[in-house]
Every structure is written in C-alpha cells, then in structure tokens.
Image (spheres, rainbow, N blue to C red):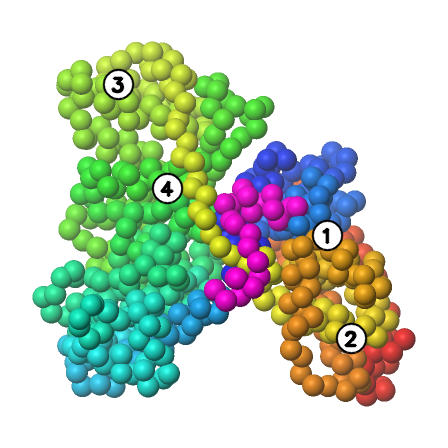
Amino acid sequence: MSTIDEVKQRLDIIDVISDYVSLKKAGRNFKALCPFHNEKTPSFFVFPERQTWHCFGSCGIGGDMFSFVMRKEGVDFGEALRMLADRAGVKLVSRQHEQKKAEEWDKLYLINEEAAHFYHRLLIEDGRSAAARDYLSKRGVADETIKAFELGFSPDSWNALHLHLNGKGYTTGDMTKAGLIVEKEGNKPHDLFRNRIMIPIHNEHGRVAGFGARTLGGDQPKYLNSPQTAVFDKSGLLYGLDKAKNSIREHDLAIIVEGYMDVITAHQHGFKNVIAPMGTSLTEKQIGIIKRLTRKMALALDADAAGEQATLRGLEIARQALREKTSSAERDWMGSDTRLEGELKVITVPTGKDPDEVIMNDPEGWSKLVSEAVPVMDYVFHAVCSRFDLSSDRGKSAAAAHLLPIISEVPDNIERELFLRRLSRAIGVDEKTLAGEAARIKPAVKAKSKENITVSVSQSLVHHTEEYCLALLLQNPWLREQSVALSPEHFEGTANRELFIAWVNNPNAETFRDTLDSTLQEHLDMLVKKTLPPATQREMETALADCTRRLWEQRLRRIKTLEEILLSEVESEGDANIIREQVQVLLQRSLEPTSQLKEIFEKSKREGRGVHR
C-alpha cells in the first residue's frame, strides 16, 4: 500500500474538507458554496463513497483530498502529501525500503491464499472432513456458500499444511511469518490449525490475511484466530467486508454482528450488508473503514448484553469514532465543538439467540428486527440506568456522571433536551441543574493514535492505464507529439496527474527530474523503470492511442456517474434542473475536443498504425 493509499484509508475526505468549508448533507453526499469562486447557489459537492469532490459551477474542477488541500493551501503535491500524512500519522520513508516490505507482504498474502486453497480442497474432497461437512450441513450452510467463502478443513495432523506448503516452495520461516506454523525451541515446527473448520479472513480488497478456525473437538479455544502478523491485524479487519462493501453502499447501512457464522448465514439469505469484527469490540480503525462506505451503522446485540460493561465500552468506541469537529460558528448552546456525524443504532436480538439462528429460522423476523433498531442513545440510556440503583444518591450520581457527557453531544437541541428531561425524571434532579452541569462538561476526546506506520511514497498501481500511459511517454520522448489529446483531467491518480502536468511543462528530459518534488521523483523513477513489452515504433504509437482512448472513456464515465448521483440526490430538494444544467455544461465542456480525438483515432485506424500528427 502506498503512502497515498494509506493516507486515504486513515482519513475521510469529509473530515478534511470540513476544516475549510461548511458542508451540508445532500442525500448521501454533501454540498457547499464553492471555496474557489463566488456563488450564491451551492455547486460544490463532496462524495464520501468515492472520496472525491467536484465543483459543478464555473470552476468545473474536482479531485480527491490531496488536490483539494493543494488548491486551498496553495501548496504543491509533495507538501499536501506531507500535511495529510502527518495528520493521518503516516510516516514517509524511501521507496526502496517500502518496496522490500511490499514484496514481503505480498508473499504473506500468497502463502495464506495457498493455505486457503489447500484447506478448501480438503473440505470438499478428503474423507477426513466428514465431521466438518456434517457440522456445516447442520448449521444450514449451502454448498454454494461454502464455495463463495472458501470454507475449509484442517486435518488432525501436525504437519499436513507444512508439507504441502513446503512442496510449493515456501520455507518454514515463511509459514511462521504468516502465522500458519508454530516453531518452539527444541521441538519440530507444527501446524497451528488442526481438526478445525477453516474460515479465511480477507481484507477489504479480497486478499487472504489470515484465518479464523472453529474446533471440531473439545479443544480450546472454541475459535482460534491467526496470530498478529504484518498483514493480519485484528483491529483493522472486518470479516465479510470484501463481499459486503457494495451492498453497504447500496443500502447505506452496515449491519455489524459478532460471529463469522452470523455473517455467512446472513449473506446466504440475501442480507449482504452484514460484517463482523474479529472477535473483539469495534475499534476506531474499523469504524473509520466503515465510514468510507456509509455513516449509518447498526450493531446486533444480544438482549442480555445491555448490562455488560464490554458492550457499553464497544458502543462508546463506535460513538467516539463518529465524532466530527465543527467550526466555532457552529458551536451549540452548550458550547460543544463536536457532534455525531452519522447514525448508530442497536438491533436487539432475542435472549439466547444468535443472529444466524434468527436469520436461518425467520428471515422476515430478522428484517423486522433491523427495521426496529433503536438509536444508540436510547439503548445506552436504558443500559446505564439498569446498571445502577437509582433509589440511592450514589446510584443517581453515577448514572448522571455516565450519561451527561453523552447527552451533551446529542447534536439536535430538542432531542438533547428530551434526554435531559428523561434523566431528570429517572434520578429526581431538576432539569435545569442537569442542563447547567452538561454545559460545563468538556467531553474527553480520544486522541487518535499516530502509529509509526512505514509505507511507501509511491503511487499505488490501482490506476494501471494511467501509469502505463505515463511510462510510454517517459520512456519514449519522441511520443510527446502524439500526446496532444491528453489533459491533466484524464489522470485521476494525484501523483499521475501532477507528474503529467510537470512533464508537459518541462520538455527538457535531462532537467525534468530536478524540477520535481522528492515524492514525485520517486514516482517518476518507478515509471521510468517500469518494464514494457517489446514493441516496434508503430506498436508503441498504437498502444499510446489505445491508452488515450481508454483514459477519455474513463473520464466521461466518471462525469456521467457524478451526474447520475447528483440527480438522484437532489430531486427532492427542488434544484434538480439547476444541477442538470450545470452537469450538462461540464459534460459539453469535456466533449468539445472529441471531434479532434475521433479524427486522430480514425486516421490511426486507416493507416493501421499509431497516432501521427
């Protein structure tokens, strides 16, 4: 993962832009008066799902959090990267160091994926897995689900996986680093997982980071997870997220359950926006990941959990993670400078039942429970009041001490007053007294830990076409004349766009590198060294023409997607016609050069070779 990707994962574009602009909710997105030109009607939109922004007014510009900071602060790409990396707690290091680490991480993913295939084949084909198949059958897990989640079986053997992976060329050291093998001094290395149902844990990009394993005998613990490794971090993984993220966006809701089987059963029955933490309470890191997909979350909790301290602690972590900083002008009558930007609810599961039982036996009943989820404040209020003896002064004081900091952060004045009145009745203390006490409370804000993360300063290889196009141009200076149909707007990757701009403005190849910021120099070096397939001059011209066409298509698709999102969000606000006009102007502006582009491509096609000018 590059520095840019790591920063984007740790920061939310809404938080970043809110430091400069007063954003207002517009459906699933946010809007504001554009900070880059004067206007009376908001045309500046921020899209949390895409982590992008765009002005549909006279600016017609857009980008990601890096480009926003660059434009607003008047800094270059390198400085914007350093500012946001510092805010995210991401340490910048050399590409050489990070490239070595990336290769090590990739090996860990590959060995885990090979182990997952091995375990899955044993479950499907090996006679020793009869008990595992029988267990899954009794839990109602269908064959298609077993395949989709690549469930597996680890035999009751000390070295079955070790021998298999060794035969694939992996060393015992590799297996140990991946958390698959246990090495004890004086003993032979042995498989960590034995006689268990194997549940591969994927990261949000679908790569196998580790495993959860349920015992088939009396071994303890009942569920055994992979140990902490370079790629398996329980605090930053959510089971099922790789399969759930599209549904979470679609429903604008993430349902969080406790166990692996809850997720598997939910997905099998069509509830695909369900995920689970790794056997622990929700962490701020996990909440941050979910926030990039939706600001609405519902936690499925057992009815008996209301009185448990661990449950309340988990809810407090989730609530704190949803806090948003407000501007001084937005401080409320209590002087609070934070608010909860999001919706957190609790689904109360019947006592003694797990979500997978409810879903399996009564899918409609599960849907009803989800629809009846209560706001977290209602749940917490009831839970706290249930924990203390409200007939005693000590109990009343303790309940007030727990609830007043929470009540003080309720963003809606009327709702906050209702909770104060409710607390007043519960403990017999005057409402005005409680309101005055709440106004004096300065809720403790947990400082987000700035972990000493070591990551690369190069751009991620997610923009393959952009990087291939730049590599062609950088490695073949004579192609410069054939790049006239390209503009910075065709490069969505921040580093790629900035490098293209610098390349256009600096035709002297010998001095070009020296004009770049150090972060862009490393990205340039990576592209210059990128291995390209052997090709003749004509084939390279054709490849550049093809890249150009695809970059144009990608840009036009992005604009059309933004248009569809905007129109769907603002129909109810009565300004759909204004937005439609703004988008059409932007779209027309983008289409103006297409006649020239079409002529270039047709000429190339007629000549049976690349672009000529």
Q: Earlier in the sequence, mark 4 or mark 3?
A: 4
Residue located at (15% from left, 19% from top) = 391
Left or right: 302, with 240 as reference point: left
- Residue that label 3 marks: 425
Q: Is residue 576 visible?
A: no
- Front-lying residue, 50 or 536: 536
Q: Earlier in the sequence, mark 1 or mark 4?
A: 4
Q: Is residue 449 left or right of residue 497?
A: left
**Residue at 86% from the left image edge and 71% from the top image edge:** 481
Residue 373: horizontal and vertical position, in percent? 32, 44
Residue drawn at (35%, 61%), measured in percent from left and top? 229
Residue denoted by label 1: 583
Mark 4 lies on residue: 318
Q: Position of residue 389 (x, y in %)?
A: 15, 24
Magenta-drawn stretch contains 90? yes
Q: Amino acid at mark 4?
A: Ala
Q: How many marks?
A: 4
- Asked if residue 127 can be seen in this view, the reply is yes
Q: How far separated are the C-alphas under marks 3 and 1?
A: 53 Å
Query: What are the residue bounds of the magenta stretch?
Result: 79-101
